[in-house]
Every structure is written in structure tokens, then in C-alpha cells.
Image (cartoon, grey):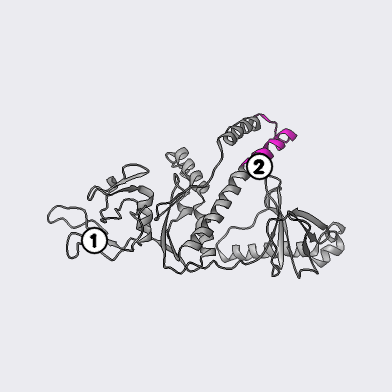
Amino acid sequence: MTEARREFAWSAAGSQTVQQQALRDFAQAMANFFAGTPRRPTWRKAGVHEGLRIVGARGRHWDVRRLSRKVGAVRIPKVGWVRFRWSRGVPAEAKSFRVNRDRAGRRHVCFAVIPPVIDGPGTGAVVGVDRGVAVSAALSTGELLSVPGVRAGETERLLRLQRRLARAVRGSNRRRRVKTAIARLRARETDRRKDWVEKTSTDLARRFDVIRLEDLKISAMVRSARGTIAASGVNVRAKAGLNRSIYAAGWGLLATRLEHKAAGRVEKINPAYTSQTCHACGHRAADNRESQAVFRCRACGHVDHADVNAAKNIAAGRAVTFLPRPTDPGRPPERGALQPLGGALNREPQLVLSSA
């Protein structure tokens, strides 16, 4: 890089720190590729993931100061002081920051700091979280939490902009303006989802000592059903809509932030049959779930919100041994079915949870 900066004036005009960090990112990407997991690095598309990273001692390579209650300024090498909206204080241990630009044209400055882990209440409280599409997160306490999505007026405006984009000429200024307007609407939805995840994860980490989630394979669940040319998929449009709903619910982001904030207190539970099993008596049947929201046990008559019932099973860790389905005499039980132990139903001790 030193030789390139001597040979090319445009290279020497930029910050050496920024260029070094870009080379390190490329070297790391190539190392990951040769390790066998990611694919080979490709050229970045203009306007996507634009940004720079500054590292070094604060006060020497960079600095930050507060100008007023809502305005701050950061000193960027080769640029000077740049103002930004002051949202929170910058900790003294910050040793690097990143400036990036999203598709909506907004620029953000992010200071790298490892936040402290949130301590639990120390009461032994346990909560189960059932993640879904209609209800983003149902708690075993009976609470139903949903991600705030796009409002009705924003949906109508988005449809108008999409029709306008379809009529715009490629490469025109009008098309660029319409794409930016669409990106800003999408950014509002993303910001609301991230804000909801941050507030929800912080609240759960403060209220409960143990947080139990379903061990969902989200990457496999959102896999496309399009298929191939030789074997085309079925219900492709419906599956694509379901995938968008899963992304909009923020399943993966919620689990990740909980693991960050409540480190060592998040447990993953096998999700099998949590929505079909009665929390009161342990009876399992697909007919127990009358609808998306109603759970009615066919054995004991217990009625509950379907997602809350699943969350209670998750909180209890599903410590239940089920009877096999009835079979003909002499016919071996189905694969994976459990034999009855000591009576009609054998249940391990359950956690005492407050009902809704």
C-alpha cells in the first residue's frame, strides 16, 4: 500500500487508516473463503454497504466532542470535524468507529464498544418465548408482543412508488429519486423492528433469570421453494410471503440480542410439538390447536391462547414423556414413539408459572 500511495496521487489523498482497514477486511474475507465456509469475495456494488472504519488512539487519530444537547462532532482523518445527531454518550474506552451510508442515503457513525451484560433480577424467574408470524413473541406470562410494521398510509404510498418506479426510465434522475423514496420507507420498517428488538430484549434480560427460546433453524425455514428448471417448486408465492413475514418478525435478531444482553442465561429448547401439546395435562394432538390463536385440549378441555400455551411448554423445557399413538395389537409402535411408564402419562416435575 505504501508503494501505491507513492505512485498514485489519488491514493495518497485518502486516509491511510481507512485503506489499511479495507485491506484487512479483504484479507479476512479471503482467509474465510479458503477455510471453506463463505464464497469467494466479489466486487461491491456502488451504493451498497458504503462506509469507512477508523481505528487508533482517541485524541490522536480521531476525537469526538459534544456541541449541544442533540449535536455532536467527530474528527475524521483527511476530512475534519463532522457533525452528527448525539443520541447517547460515547464511552471513554471506545477505540474505533465506523461511518456508513445506507440505501436511504442516511449516514451513521457507530463507535465500537462492548456493552456490559445485563444482570438478572436474581429471583429465579423463568420465561418461555414463542416466536411467530401473527404474534412476533408470545411469553409464558401471557404477554403478546408484536413488531410494529409498515402503517396503512405507508403501504399505500409504497404501492404508488412501486408503480411509478415501473414506469420510470432506467438511468433517469426520476428513477433514482423514486428508488431513494422507496428505500426510506423500507428503512422506517427496519428501524422500527430494530428498536422493538432492543427494547424487548433489554426488558426480558432485566425481568427474568432464565430465558428459553425454541431452537429454530431460521436459515432452513426461509429457504426458497422456487426449485429448479428441471423440478419447479410448488406454492412459491405463498412460501415467499411467509419468508418475508419471518424476516419482518425479527426472529433471529431477537435471539442474537438476548444472547448478547443475557449471556449464559438463554437456553434453546427443541421446538417439536410445543404448539400441539397441552401445558396443563401433556396431551399432544394436532387437533388441539383449533385456529391460529385458540388452543383447546381434546383431553382435559384446557383453553388458552395457542402461542401462550406453546410459550409455557418452552418455559417448562417440554419435560414430558408422551404416550405412543394407539396401534393395533401386535403392531410395533411408530418410530420415535415412547412407551408408557408407570401409568397413562409420566411427567417430570414442571416449573410453576403464573397463568395469563
Amino acid under disc 1? Leu
Q: Are the two marked residues, 1 and 2, in contact with CB atoms closer than 8 angstroms?
A: no
Locate residue 191 relative to residue 267 in the image: left or right. right
C-alpha separation, residue under disc 1 versus residue under disc 2: 54 Å
Question: Where residue 201 appears, x then y in whole percent?
Answer: 52, 58
- Which residue is the site of mark 2? 184
Q: Which residue is drawn at 40% across and 52% down?
A: 142
Locate residue 109 relative to residue 230 in the image: left or right. right
**Residue 25 or 316: which is nearer the viewer?**
316
Secondary structure beneath dot 1 equals loop
Instruction: Please tell me the numbered disc located at residue 41.
Output: none
Is residue 168 shown in magenta? yes
Q: Is residue 243 above or below residue 259?
A: above
**Residue 176 or 109: which is nearer the viewer?**
109
Question: Where residue 210 appears, x then y in whole percent?
Answer: 44, 65
Question: Where residue 271 appears, x then y in whole percent?
Answer: 38, 56
Is residue 158 shown in magenta? no
Q: Report the magenta residues as a range.
A: 167-185
- Which residue is the site of mark 1? 338
**Dot 1, how many residues are within 10 Å of its Cα: few (below 14), some (14-19), or many (20+)?**
few
> Is residue 270 something one can see in this rendering?
no
**Dot 2, how many residues are within 10 Å of its Cα: few (below 14), some (14-19), or many (20+)?**
some
